[in-house]
Amino acid sequence: MTDTNEPGAGWAPPSLPSAVQKPTLPPAVSPSRTPPSNPGLGGVDPTAPMMQVVPGVAAPSAPKRSRAKTVGALAGVGALVAAGAFAVVTITGNDEKGGAASPTEVGTLLTAALDNEDVLGVIDLLLPGEREAFRDPIIDTFDNLRRLGVLADDASLSAIGGVDIKLTDVVVRDTTTNAPEIVNLELSGSATVSVDGEKVPLGGLLIDDVFEGERPDMDADPQTEEFEDVPLTVVQRDGRWYLSAFYTVAEQARADTDLDIPATGVAPKGADAPEGALDDMLEAVSDQNLERLIGLLDPTEAEALQRYAPLFLDDAQAELDDAGIHVSISDTAFSVSGSGSRRFVLVDAITRPSASTATRRRCARPT
């Protein structure tokens, strides 16, 4: 690993979020698929007057306005169902390129896709590894919501049922970083949201058991809120630019420091067998080797963490060493199930005696 940056105080490792908290644009996930000729636009011209692109301009220093508030009719069950219908769209399929030709085009296509409730267009912009990380949990969530009756059986898999979003006067600003393949965007504009309650895909469980057999009145007149400087980070891969949730979180953490993005991060290093990966992980825990732990994580999910780790790794390792915690793990036994590129490893037996005099542990044999 090569790192020419000194670790700085105040920088904490980015977590691996399910969603980025700062952006107020509606979250979405959807199937990755072969994009149409204008992916994610739903027939909308990205150069239309509604979108102003300001390349190379830094974020304004004016005071931030309040973030867009959730429309009242989406509160409670309405928010759950509408967000569920939006977020759990199946994301199977195969997109060949996806992304966009430039950083600002990501913002343009994202805005156009959201404005047309085109969740497939939104997902088409995500970094391919992040689509892979989200796919199975989202599919399982959608199936379970329908099975439990939270969502209706005929809930749409390609649009937000009953929710209409209109984005206007959107300005996209891009700011380069010291890493040419990583660019920060800021989006400002207005969002108008309206709800047609009859089209929200409420399932029978909610209608019968929660609302006593009567569909609740969830209609909401259009409400408009301004959003300003919503931060997003885009990453270049093989000549295309992609939106990244994990890099967005990492960049927001780095923004509070004067540190550059490391030229190289922690190199991922897996094992030859599924059980070997877990065995190496436990060994790294026993050795309290943070760099090895981070390197063993799936780069599909932990790419941003691995890239930014040199910013905090030395300080974090020193604090861990000073804590005086000693752990010894031995007598492990595993069983492996599954096939293909993903396997499940069950810990059949493990002994965890601790050498620390401050902590007394007992042997455990989970099954």
Image: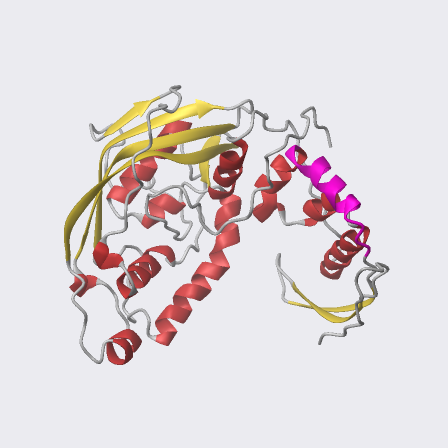
Q: Is residue 95 visible?
A: yes
- Where residue 363 sits in the image (x, y, percent)? 80, 72
Q: Considering the image in quadrants, where does the C terminus appear?
A: bottom right
Pick the quarter of the image with the N terminus. Answer: top right
Going by the picture, which residue comes out furthest to the front?
Answer: 358
Q: Is residue 14 above or below residue 172?
A: below
User: Can you see residue 38?
Assistant: no
Q: Relative to 163, does residue 172 appear above or below in the rendering? A: above
Residue located farthest toward the left when viewing the structure as drawn? 221
- Residue 81: x and y in percent read 30, 63
> Does residue 24 belong to the magenta stretch?
no
Comparing 68 with 235, the one in front is 68
Q: Position of residue 256 (x, y in %)?
A: 52, 31
Q: Is residue 312 magenta?
A: yes
Position of 109 with respect to 225 (left or right) is right
Relative to residue 273, is residue 246 depicted above or below?
above
Q: Nearer the viewer, residue 264 or 343?
A: 264
Q: Residue at x 76, y 57 (%)?
A: 282
Chief secondary structure of the magenta span? helix
Q: Residue furthest top?
A: 56
Residue at point 15%, 49% (across, down):
222
Q: Residue 338: which quarter of the image?
A: bottom right
Identify the magenta region: 311-326
In the image, is 142 to the left or to the right of 219?
right
Q: Residue at x 56, y 47 (%)?
A: 15
